[in-house]
Image: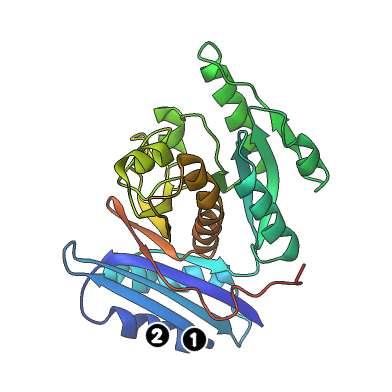
Amino acid sequence: MTTLALTVQCPSTRGIVAAIANFLADQGCNLTDSAQFDDAETGNFFMRVSFRSETGADRTALEAAFAEVAGRFDMTFAFHDETEKMKVVLMVSRFGHCLNDLLYRWRIGALPIDIVAVISNHMDYQKVVVNHDIPFHCIKVTKANKAEAEAAQMAIIEESGAELVVLARYMQVLSDEMCQKMSGRIINIHHSFLPSFKGANPYKQAFERGVKLIGATSHYVTADLDEGPIIEQDIIRVTHAQSAEDYVSLGRDVEAQVLARAIHAHIHHRVFLNGNKTVVFPASPGSHASERMG
């Protein structure tokens, strides 16, 4: 039985939910999960529906048939096969906690993605990546070769067919051109609870301000550094007795968890861009299940 998801974005008006439900019922589909949001400020409507086709209707046929409904409501829409694994490229520098966490989640099936390559500007994690039978590419980046290095990175991304790039503590700023070309398809983890403490040393900034909570933020990458639409955040409590180095250590687990949750939301098509913000719907039942425990 085919399991699909339909994502819809359009101007808010009466009758959208009924039209979608009636269409799917008429096509022999049974709804298994549904989430919607009507943004009163922008007038935008967002919806994600999971369903099973009980008559064998495939994605191509449903897309063609749905065009009439979409035209009626001026919808942007897409049908997604929930069994297909998104192709992902991971990028990392010298902090490996997020990379190792993602590799583990991928290995046990908790993060159902197809890691097609890992790109780094250092050799530190070549062995661990190659031991997972994943292609590893070391591309050194300097001020002098930045354009050439980024062209090489883009060649790997395009040749591998990657649909998503994850900056798993990749400590190089991407160019405006790359950010625009990959808009909505690059996810970063920032070791701070944005919008506070931007830049390269947020834990030191937080320590100097004597904060009682530190956190991590996963967001889409834009040309404006650390300003992209936020997907996921979390925090951990700290005290006056802890050092800046303690902040770094305590923050590692939060960073790894926040990045994994952001990727999980993206690959299941639960994230919608809404101006400079996002709409993130809850996970469908069963989408967190792992193929094995370890």
Circle 2: is it few (<14), some (14-19), or many (20+) Cα within 10 Å? Answer: some
Mark 1 — residue? Answer: 31
Q: Which quadrant is the N terminus positioned in?
A: bottom right
Q: Nearer the viewer, residue 278 or 71?
A: 278
Return the x and y of residue 150 as percentages of the image width and height: 55, 25
Q: Earlier in the sequence, mark 1 or mark 2?
A: 2
Residue 131 versus residue 150 in the image, above or below: below
What is the three-letter code of the residue carrying label 2? Ala
Q: Which quadrant is the C terminus positioned in?
A: bottom right
Return the x and y of residue 21 as percentages of the image width and height: 40, 85
Query: Visible in this render: residue 186?
Result: no
User: For the residue labelled by badge 1, is the local secondary structure a helix, a strand or a loop?
Assistant: strand
Q: Which mark is residue 74?
A: none
Q: Are marks 1 and 2 in contact (CB under 8 Å)?
A: yes
Residue 61 versus residue 244 in the image, above or below: below
Mark 2 — residue? Answer: 21
What is the three-letter code of the residue carrying label 1? Leu
Q: Nearer the viewer, residue 77 or 189?
A: 189
Circle 1: is it few (<14), some (14-19), or many (20+) Cα within 10 Å? Answer: some
Return the x and y of residue 41 as percentages of the image width and height: 16, 64
Q: CA distance from mark 1 to mark 2?
A: 8 Å
Query: Visible in this render: residue 137?
Result: yes
Q: Residue at x 43, y 68 (%)?
A: 7
The scheme the figure's colours follow is rainbow
Pair 1/2: label in front: 1
Residue 54 versus residue 59 in the image, above or below: below
